[in-house]
Image (cartoon, grey):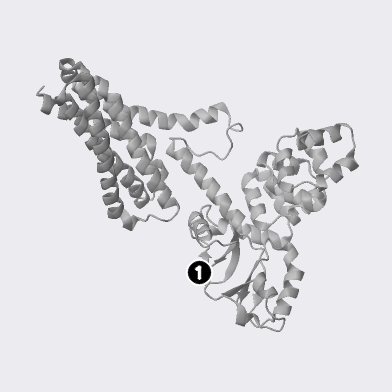
């Protein structure tokens, strides 16, 4: 029996004590996922049976639809208890998903000092590190002993999102070092923090791009990254789970853009038919209109097609090969820029590398096609025309696929926009143009 079936069974039988014990044994993430699948009435009844700490933690993992439904039926006291136990970054995320009427209730339920911090976090730009950081961290003073530091962690740590890394501040809250709990536990109690803290600190500034910061966390295998303001005062930290969320959302957006879709916040089934259509139709119109260029080019060479109808049979192969070649390069370059491996300064390195790869690939497939055409049709001139077109198309497509994403980044456009659909359309027109020009020149049409 699945967890959902078990919860429904106990609710229907009104065995609330048994359900309370059952929910207490479950993982909070699993509880949240099951709640997303329950009916509105079941959600309310089951949620009120959760232990207070479990309820707040599970609440942070629930879909925004479920969260909104629960907030609407909660009393002010219930909402206050849930809001009190939410970490600051989870509260900010929650506020971003809720309608204005519920935002006011949530802020009212928060403690005055928390409300001030929440309002400050909401001021940061959506794509900045400040928008995803939390202010719940353990800070120490360099003159502390290890024993005093451990006592402070025990006292303050229960309300912090992480205690594995502690941050050493001066009296003006400037970040001057960090120390891990491992270092504290392995040091004698009378050791001074100043003697064991790490001063070579990897950090981020509040207005840095959050994807860049997530890359830094991944690069250095960090559990958390401190975030400072322009005066190097510690204002928050970004934890590994926040970095994973940033990566996931960025990957989803890039995937949609690379396939000519407007990014959506909702999942597939939660998005209505009309909303799906509205996010697809604009790009389809753009690609359809751009494909009309290819149509016009083909129409301009009707004479060549009439003279040698065989030429038409190679068009799909040439266009598909070119589009696929460009997509390969674009995917690799976009991925390289996303992981911070490729930068704008690498433009000529990328150009030269893609040219060599393209020439090698195109030469092999052109030779293979020449042999096939000679065997199948016995026409060396047609074979030569197709082979030269393949070389030109693949080289052009791979260079275009490599350069367009970098150009997009240069002009502050998301590189993912310059992906498969757009590249395929441009390459189609180019391949048709050079194909007929090679054919007319070689076959003397």
In the image shown, does 89 or 246 lie closer to the viewer? 246
Of residue 222 and residue 358, the one placed in the foreground of this image is 358
Q: Residues within 10 Å of mark 1 (few under 14, many from 20)?
A: few
Q: Is residue 38 left or right of residue 118?
A: right
- Image quarter hosting the N terminus: top right
Determine the image quadrant of residue 97: top right
Q: Which residue is mark 1?
A: 230
Mark 1: secondary structure:
loop
Camera-side residue of 224 and 64? 224
Q: Is residue 81 above or below residue 395?
A: below
Q: Quadrant of residue 425?
A: top left
Q: Position of residue 140 (x, y in %)?
A: 66, 75
Please state if 291 lies on the left or on the right of 73 as rendered: left
**How many numbered marks does the figure carry?**
1
Q: Residue at x 46, y 35 (%)?
A: 261
**Residue 354 location in percent, x, y?**
29, 47
> Quick check: 213 left or right of 296?
right
308, above or below 85, in the image? above
Q: Residue at x 65, y 44 (%)?
A: 98
Question: x and y percent of residue 395 in the render?
Answer: 25, 40
Determine if residue 170 is in view. Answer: no
């Amino acid at each position: 029996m699945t967890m959902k079936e078990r919860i429904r069974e106990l609710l229907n039988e009104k065995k609330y004590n048994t359900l309370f014990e059952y929910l207490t044994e479950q993982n909070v993430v699993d509880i949240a996922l099951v709640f997303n699948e329950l009916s509105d009435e079941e959600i309310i009844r089951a949620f009120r049976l959760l232990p207070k700490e479990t309820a707040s933690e599970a609440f942070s993992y629930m879909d925004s639809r479920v969260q909104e439904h629960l907030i609407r039926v909660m009393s002010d006291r219930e909402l206050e208890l849930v809001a009190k136990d939410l970490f600051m970054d989870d509260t900010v995320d929650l506020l971003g998903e809720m309608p204005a009427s519920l935002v006011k209730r949530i802020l009212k339920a928060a403690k005055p000092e928390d409300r001030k911090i929440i309002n400050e976090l909401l001021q940061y730009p959506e794509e900045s590190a400040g928008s995803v950081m939390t202010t719940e961290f353990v800070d120490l003073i360099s003159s502390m002993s290890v024993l005093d530091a451990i006592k402070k962690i025990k006292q303050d740590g229960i309300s912090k999102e992480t205690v594995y890394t502690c941050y050493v501040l001066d009296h003006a809250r400037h970040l001057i070092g960090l120390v891990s709990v491992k270092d504290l536990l392995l040091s004698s109690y009378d050791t001074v923090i100043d003697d064991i803290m790490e001063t070579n600190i990897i950090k981020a500034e509040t207005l840095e791009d959050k994807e860049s910061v997530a890359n830094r966390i991944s690069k250095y295998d960090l559990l958390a990254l401190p975030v400072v303001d322009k005066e190097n005062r510690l204002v928050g930290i970004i934890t590994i789970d926040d970095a994973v969320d940033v990566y996931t959302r960025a990957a989803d957006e890039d995937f949609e853009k690379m396939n000519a879709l407007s990014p959506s916040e909702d999942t597939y089934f939660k998005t209505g038919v009309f909303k799906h259509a509205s996010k697809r139709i604009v790009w389809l119109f753009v690609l359809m209109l751009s494909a009309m260029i290819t149509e016009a080019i083909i129409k301009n060479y009707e004479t060549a097609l009439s003279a040698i109808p065989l030429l038409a049979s190679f068009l799909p192969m040439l266009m598909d090969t070119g589009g696929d070649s460009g997509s390969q390069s674009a995917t690799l370059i976009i991925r390289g820029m996303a992981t911070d491996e490729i930068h704008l300064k690498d433009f000529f390195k990328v150009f030269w590398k893609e040219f060599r790869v393209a020439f090698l690939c195109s030469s092999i497939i052109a030779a293979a096609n020449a042999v096939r055409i000679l065997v199948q049709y016995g026409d060396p001139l047609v074979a030569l025309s197709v082979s030269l077109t393949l070389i030109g198309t693949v080289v052009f497509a791979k260079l275009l696929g490599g350069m367009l994403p970098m150009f997009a980044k240069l002009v502050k456009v998301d590189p993912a926009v310059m992906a498969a659909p757009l590249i395929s359309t441009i390459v189609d027109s180019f391949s048709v143009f050079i194909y007929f020009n090679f054919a007319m020149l070689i076959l003397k049409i």
